[in-house]
C-alpha cells in the first residue's frame, strides 16, 4: 500500500500535457539485437595465440577485477577495476596479457545494432562502472539466464544509456603507464600503417631486433604478423563499406600497388578483395566468419 500511495503522490505532480498528441523524447539509437554474453575470470587460454580481432558487433566490457591492457585501434588502454569500455563495430582490438595467467573478472556483452553515431563519444574512451550499472547488470544476467528474449535488448539499451547519462567517461591518452615503448610502437603502426619495421625502429630510436623481441615478449605475437593483421583487418573493414574503391583501400592500408594488396589479401583471406566485398555487402556476418579463417604463421 505504501508503494501505491507513493506512486499516486508522484504521478499527481505531473502537469497535464498541453498537447495530447505530442509526447516527449524519441530513442537516440536503434535497439540492440542478437545479444551474447560471457564471463572471464582468467585469460590463460588467450595467451596461447593472439589475433587482432575485428568484426561488425559491439562489445560492452565491464572489468570487476584486476586491471588488464587492451589495444583498440592503436590506442593502448589500461582497464582498471570498476572500469569498462565499449568496442565499436570494425574496431581492431586485442588484449595485451603477460605470459603468466591473469586472474580477473570481466563481463562481456556483445550485440549488433543498426549503424548510428550516438556512441561515437565512447570510441577509445573508458567509463567508470557505477552502482546503477551493477544493478542493471544483475537484471541483465537474470534475464539472460532465464532467456527472456523480450527483456534482454532493452536491458542492454539501458546499460548503454546509463554509461552516457552518468557523465563518467575517462578520456584516454594513448599510453599505458608501465609500457611507454609499447605505446609508441602501437601508435606508430596505426598512424603510419605502411611503414616498415626498420623505418619504425629508426624513427623510435631502437634497434630493430630489440623492437621485435620487445613486442613479441609483451604482446605474444610477432611485430611483423601484428602489422599484417592490422592491415588485413583494416582492409576488410573498408571493403565492408562502399566509400572507397579497391585502389584507394590498397593505398589506405599501406600497399604500394593494387596487385601487392590483392596478393596479400588473398593469401590470408583466401578470396580476392572484390570477392570479399561482394560477399559481405548483404551479409555482414560473413565478415566474422571469414575473419576467423585468417591465419598468420608466427615464425619470428
Image (cartoon, rainbow, N blue to C red):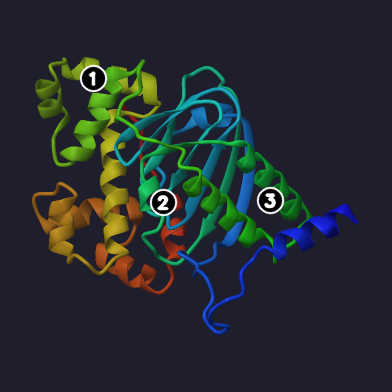
x and y percentages locating residue 33 in the rendered image: 57, 64
Using a 10 Å C-alpha cutoff, classify the residue at mark 1 as few (fewer than 14 neighbours), some (14 to 19) or many (20 or more): many
Q: Residue at 38% of width from left, 26% of height from top?
A: 219
Which quadrant is home to the N terminus? Answer: bottom right
Q: Which residue is identified by label 2?
A: 88
5 versus 106 height, above or below: below
Question: Is residue 272 among the parts visible in the rendering?
Answer: no
Is label 2 in a helix, a strand or a loop? loop
How far is mark 2 from mark 3, CA to CA? 20 Å
x and y percentages locating residue 289 in the rendered image: 47, 58
Q: Is residue 258 left or right of residue 295?
A: left
Q: Which residue is identified by label 1?
A: 211
242 or 223: nearer the viewer: 242
Q: Which residue is identified by label 3?
A: 140
146 versus 184 height, above or below: below
x and y percentages locating residue 282 in the rendered image: 40, 74
292 versus 11 height, above or below: above
Amino acid at each position: 500500500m505504501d508503494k501505491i500511495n507513493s506512486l499516486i503522490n508522484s504521478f499527481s505532480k505531473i502537469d497535464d500535457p498541453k498537447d495530447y498528441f505530442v509526447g516527449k523524447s524519441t530513442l537516440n539509437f536503434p535497439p540492440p539485437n542478437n545479444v551474447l554474453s560471457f564471463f572471464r575470470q582468467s585469460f590463460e587460454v588467450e595467451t596461447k595465440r593472439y589475433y587482432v580481432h575485428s568484426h561488425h558487433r559491439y562489445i560492452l566490457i565491464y572489468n570487476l577485477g584486476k586491471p588488464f591492457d587492451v589495444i583498440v585501434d592503436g590506442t593502448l588502454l589500461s582497464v582498471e577495476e570498476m572500469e569498462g569500455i565499449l568496442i565499436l563495430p570494425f574496431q581492431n582490438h586485442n588484449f595485451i596479457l603477460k605470459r603468466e595467467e591473469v586472474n580477473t573478472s570481466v563481463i562481456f556483452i556483445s550485440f549488433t545494432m543498426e549503424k548510428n553515431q550516438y556512441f561515437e563519444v565512447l570510441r577509445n574512451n573508458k567509463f567508470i562502472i557505477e552502482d546503477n550499472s551493477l544493478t542493471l547488470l544483475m537484471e541483465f544476467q537474470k534475464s539472460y539466464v532465464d532467456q527472456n528474449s523480450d527483456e534482454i535488448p532493452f536491458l542492454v539499451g539501458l546499460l548503454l544509456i546509463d554509461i552516457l547519462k552518468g557523465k563518467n567517461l575517462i578520456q584516454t591518452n594513448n599510453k599505458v603507464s608501465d609500457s611507454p615503448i609499447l605505446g609508441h610502437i602501437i601508435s606508430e603502426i596505426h598512424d603510419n600503417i605502411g611503414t616498415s619495421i626498420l623505418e619504425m625502429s629508426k624513427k623510435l630510436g631502437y634497434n630493430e631486433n630489440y623492437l621485435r623481441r620487445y613486442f613479441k615478449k609483451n604482446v605474444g605475437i610477432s611485430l611483423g604478423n601484428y602489422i599484417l593483421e592490422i592491415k588485413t583487418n583494416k582492409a576488410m573493414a573498408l571493403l565492408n563499406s562502399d566509400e572507397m574503391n579497391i585502389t584507394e583501400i590498397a593505398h589506405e592500408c599501406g600497399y604500394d600497388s593494387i596487385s601487392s594488396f590483392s596478393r596479400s589479401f588473398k593469401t590470408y583471406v583466401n578470396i580476392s578483395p572484390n570477392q570479399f566485398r561482394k560477399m559481405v555487402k548483404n551479409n555482414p556476418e560473413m565478415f566474422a566468419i571469414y575473419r576467423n579463417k585468417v591465419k598468420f604463421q608466427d615464425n619470428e
